[in-house]
Image (cartoon, rainbow, N blue to C red):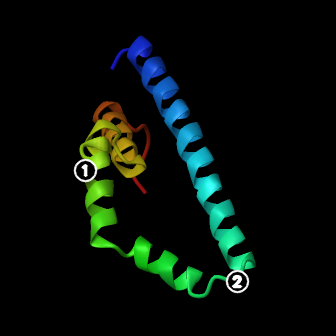
């Protein structure tokens, strides 16, 4: 990815994060309002939704390929260390 593509991707991610955060905040407020209204079992319903196979399918489909697009920190670190070690020539006595 060149620098222009990286900037566009970062802008896209920032926009998505803002939208998701806003939606999450709305849901949290709604859940709190339901609890305050005395609706029984709100926490149990929420946990059930979180554990739902349907939710996992939607999540997996929505983020398919995302991890391939952005390597994990460990992969970045390993790549950088490997590059460094390939070109490193130590001076002096070994330990």
Residue 73 or residue 29, whichever sits in front:
29
Q: Determine whether 57 is above or below 8 in the image.
A: below
Query: Which type of secondary structure does the marked residue at label 2 adopt?
Result: loop
Q: Quadrant of residue 80?
A: top left
In the image, residue 57 lies at what x, y percent? 25, 60
Give the residue drawn at x 27%, y 71%. 53
With 86 as the anchor, is 30 left or right in this view?
A: right
3D distance between C-alphas at marks 2 and 1: 35 Å
Name the residue that disc number 2 marks.
38
User: Residue at the right extreme?
Assistant: 36
Name the residue that disc number 1 marks.
61
Q: Determine whether 10 is above or below 58 in the image.
A: above
Sequence order check, earlier mark of 2 and 1: 2
Q: Quadrant of residue 25?
A: bottom right
Q: Quadrant of the N terminus?
A: top left
In the image, residue 69 lies at what x, y percent? 30, 36
Query: Which type of secondary structure does the marked residue at label 1 adopt?
Result: helix
With 68 as the anchor, is 77 left or right in this view?
A: right
Q: Quadrant of residue 17?
A: top right
Give the residue drawn at x 32%, y 34%. 83
Q: Quadrant of the C terminus?
A: bottom left
Give the residue drawn at x 75%, y 77%. 36
Total marks placed: 2
Give the residue drawn at x 47%, y 27%. 12
Q: Which mark is residue 50?
A: none
Q: Determine whether 49 is above or below 65 in the image.
A: below
Q: Determine whether 41 is above or below 23 in the image.
A: below
Front tag of 2 and 1: 2
Question: Mark 1, residues whose alpha carbon is within 10 Å: few (<14), some, or many (≥20)?
Answer: few
Residue 32 or residue 2, whichever sits in front:
32
User: Residue at the top extreme?
Assistant: 4
In the image, residue 62 lies at what x, y percent? 31, 47
């Amino acid at each position: 990815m060149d620098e222009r593509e990286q900037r566009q991707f970062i802008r896209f991610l920032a926009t998505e994060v803002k939208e998701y955060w806003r939606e999450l905040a709305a849901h949290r407020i709604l859940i709190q309002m339901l609890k305050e209204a005395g609706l029984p079992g709100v926490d149990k319903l929420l946990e059930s939704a979180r554990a739902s196979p349907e939710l996992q399918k939607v999540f997996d489909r929505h983020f398919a390929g995302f991890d391939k697009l952005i390597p994990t920190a460990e992969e970045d670190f390993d790549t950088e260390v490997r590059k460094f070690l390939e070109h490193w020539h130590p001076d002096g006595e070994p330990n």
